[in-house]
Image: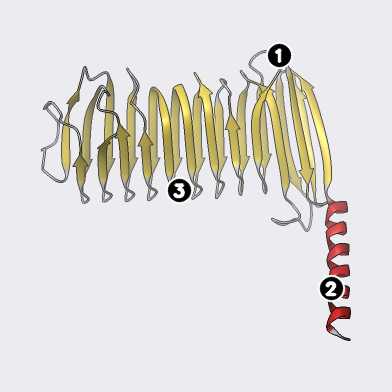
Amino acid sequence: MDSCQHAARWAAVMIVATATLACAQVRKEYRYTVGPRASVSVTNQYGPISVKPAVGSQVTITVIMASDKVEIDQTQSGSRVDILSHLLDGANADNGRVDYVVMVPADASVSLHSTSGPLRAEKLHGDLTVEGTAANVEVRDITSAHVHVKTLNGPVTLTNITNGHVEITSVSGDVTMNAVNGQLVQVNSTSGTIRYDGDFGDSGEYRLSSHSGNIEATAPSTASFDVTARSVKGTVENDFTLQPKHTPFVIKTGSAFAGTMGKAASSVKLFSISGKIHLKQR
């Protein structure tokens, strides 16, 4: 067989394989009419979930299943909607993948669960719970809502969260927050890096804590906050000129600092066992 014949046969095999894969995929759409402040839960073992606001009082869920090794379990009870990817015998990360696009009323409470992700939610003002193992989590443009995120090693990015109640727990995934403020912004990480870039709001409590990961918090010179920062075995750096304050621990150059800026409107607590802490002035 010459090279041209071999190439032609290989191309034919690839075309058949692609066509088979396309035929194996199944697309379905589910629609539910709900009342105010509905509750929507999506659990997906393998694959992404994307949530966006819908117009009106309907929940629309579009799914693309990679094969017949997975099916969708779906129930509605009043204004509560539950969707679950049900893996069948022989399912794995490839043929058990399901892609979800979820449209919900903006005031709905949403709960997302996926092992692999990614998980994305945007432009909502209902409470949001996101849980993933290695899933990349991205949440943006959320107003006046509780945002709870739990991951094992997936990175977490929050952008433009206003007047929120934010709680993030991660074992080794990095956590990045841009323009995030609210009554409570709390991050606990074992080894991941925590980055905050915002203004610390005007009356909130910000608690960033990591066992061995670094913490980098950036704020403008006009920010108003009361800060304590301490690393037991790591180092600390501060770019602000702080007014002194009393602390329950000994202030030691290079390992701890404390003080206030402006009217000390918000409380900021930065703590690490062995990571580096840097309070940066934008």
- For the residue pair 260 and 35, the one nearer the viewer reads as 260
What residue type is disc 1 on?
Gly
- Which residue, as the protein is rendered here, is positioned at the far top? 36
**Disc sitting over residue 274 in the figure:** none
User: Position of 112 compared to 9: left or right?
Assistant: left
- Contact check, label 3 and label 2, Cβ < 8 Å: no
- Which residue, as the protein is rendered here, is positioned at the far bottom? 1
Q: Earlier in the sequence, mark 3 or mark 2?
A: 2
Name the spot of residue 175 as percent of width and height, x first. Answer: 43, 42
Residue in the image at 47% along x and 28% along y: 160
Residue linked to disc 2: 10
- Note whether 240 is above or below 89 in the view shown: above
Q: Earlier in the sequence, mark 1 or mark 2?
A: 2
- Contact check, label 3 and label 1, Cβ < 8 Å: no
What residue type is disc 2 on?
Trp
Q: Under tag 2, what secondary structure?
A: helix
Residue linked to disc 3: 173
Q: Under tag 1, what secondary structure?
A: loop
* C-alpha span from label 3 to label 2: 41 Å
Quadrant (top left, top right, bottom left, bottom right) of the C terminus: top left
* C-alpha span from label 3 to label 1: 36 Å
Residue linked to disc 1: 35
Name the spot of residue 52 as percent of width and height, x first. Answer: 65, 28
User: Position of 69 compared to 101: left or right?
Assistant: right
User: Position of 163 compared to 74: left or right?
Assistant: left
Q: Earlier in the sequence, mark 3 or mark 1?
A: 1
User: Position of 45 compared to 267: left or right?
Assistant: right
Instruction: Indicate which label's residue lies in the foreground, 3 or 2.
Output: 2
Figure coloring: secondary structure
- For the residue pair 225 and 13, the one nearer the viewer reads as 13
